[in-house]
Image (tube, grey):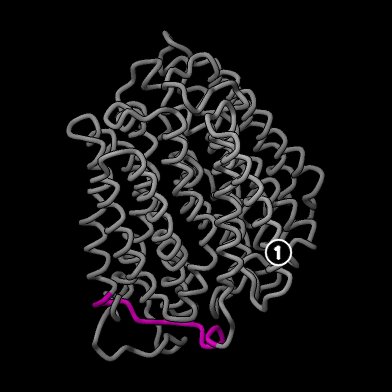
Amino acid sequence: MTSPSPRPQPASPTPETGVRMGTTAGRWVVAAAVLGSGVAFLDSTVVNAALPAIARDLGADLGDLQWVVTGYLLTLGSLLVLGGSLGDRYGRRRVFVIGLAAFAATSSLCGLAPDTGTLIAARCLQGVAAALLVPNSLALVSASFVPSHRARAIGAWSGLGGVATAIGPFLGGWLIDSVSWRLVFFVNLPVVATAIAIALRHVPESRDEHARDARLDVGGSIALTCGLAGVVYALIEGPGGDHPLTVTALAVIGVLALGAFVVIETRVEQPILPLGLFRSQQFSGANAVTFAVYAALGATTFLLVVHLQTDLGYSALEAGASLLPITVLMLAFSARAGALAQRIGPRAPMTIGPLVVACGMALLGRVEPGSTYWTSVFPAVLVLGSGLALTVAPLTATVLGAVEDAHAGIASAVNNSVARLAGLLAVAVLPAAAGLSASQGLDLAGGFARAMDIAAVLAAAGGVLAFLTIRRSVVTRSVTRGDAAIPCYDVGVRIAMADSGRAANPE
């Protein structure tokens, strides 16, 4: 792709030349970042609701639908840190715009897919595009604003991103029911076009001049992607599969590639996964909690939306909107949970929150044909959302507070990748563990309750891990984002609000 604009570019923003909140320039920067991240949140919100319609139209079985979800998560989770590094090196606006253009192209491929194989391949490519887009969305905001206005800008970005997440279930469900599941991908195009136009015209370019001298960890990214692909293929296709030799070979290749990834990460100058960060018990513990909670959440949202439509007769709109209370609770109470953790320390909310999440998942396991939304689904979702609201902001802040200021950006990216990969592995493994075969149809009634019980155990394990690994002490220091020092819990709350979409729909 050619350079986004032939015009002379402004210099990277400094405290004197950066934009400010309340100005026209500041509003344009926030608008571009919100539209960019919003299109990714919107896509992840509506695709799960479209799965039954995709199955009917393309003749897909459960295994195919697993790949529709995991193909996207595989490339996004594996390449997320690399996407941020590319923005630091070659220009955050440039990589953001390239990611937007690629996201539009791959969304079109998804919408035009004539069969499940094409759709899965397009979803993998869409994840690559999102890996360029997602990390550079927040980076644009952080790099463009003067330090004194940066925290307010991040707050505006996260709050407006939550609005996009809330709209998603209604818009996606209406499009699926009224027209076709294909429109959930085509609706991305006008949003992306608007974001590109704003970014090219109104967003200043920025980059990390020191990043140009460092080598990109391309080998690590390739090894991680290939390793996960081989293992996930074996997990999805292995149980009861028709090609045991192929499955075994790919599983072995996947394990070897993951081993090579660990070796590569210990030898490169700037690894995509700095293993030294995990020497901190606080950082390792917080990421272990992230893995357990988001694995449980990924499997729950994947199976619940399908179960509601195929076994309980919900429309796509009703099924997509069924999880809306989670987003509302996250937006309403994440700030209060962060403030509570700042007063008493993160250990208690990070222990109790996942246990409450587990209770919500156990309640969802009691949702069966004949159940009504208000007496069965809504109470369970209410409990689940309350647990997440208590967990996510302290969790994010603990990750940021466990590392040195210079590593805050990579720590956040690693935690985001852990959450994505946890959802990926859970969607691949948990259905089979619950007795749901990848080759079967979409009748989940026989295994849905078992799947929710397993998810509840996973979430509860997250609470136990938090109790064992997270310190009681209150994090009081600040995290430096660019040139601005922002309290750790303030950053955690803002990122958690923006990630309410990731929590409610962790694709």
What residue is rendered at 52% in x and 57% in y? 495
> Neighbour class for label 1 at 10 Å: few (<14), some, many (≥20)?
few
113 sits to left or right of 471: left
Q: Which residues are magenta?
A: 200-212
| Residue 116 point in image, percent of width and height | 34, 38
Task: Let me know if residue 192 appears in the view.
Answer: yes
* The residue positioned farthest toward the right in the image shown: 468
Is residue 458 one of those drawn in magenta?
no
- x then y, percent, for residue 75: 48, 55
> At 66% from the left edge and 41% from the top edge, which residue is drawn?
292
Percent of width and height locating residue 30: 35, 67
Which residue occupies the extreme top position in the image? 370
Residue at numbered disc 1:
476
Measured along the vertical axis of the image, is residue 305 above or below residue 35? above
Depth check: give the residue in front, 22 or 327: 327
Residue appearing at x 43%, y 17% in the figure: 443
Rendered position, 412 above or below 313? below
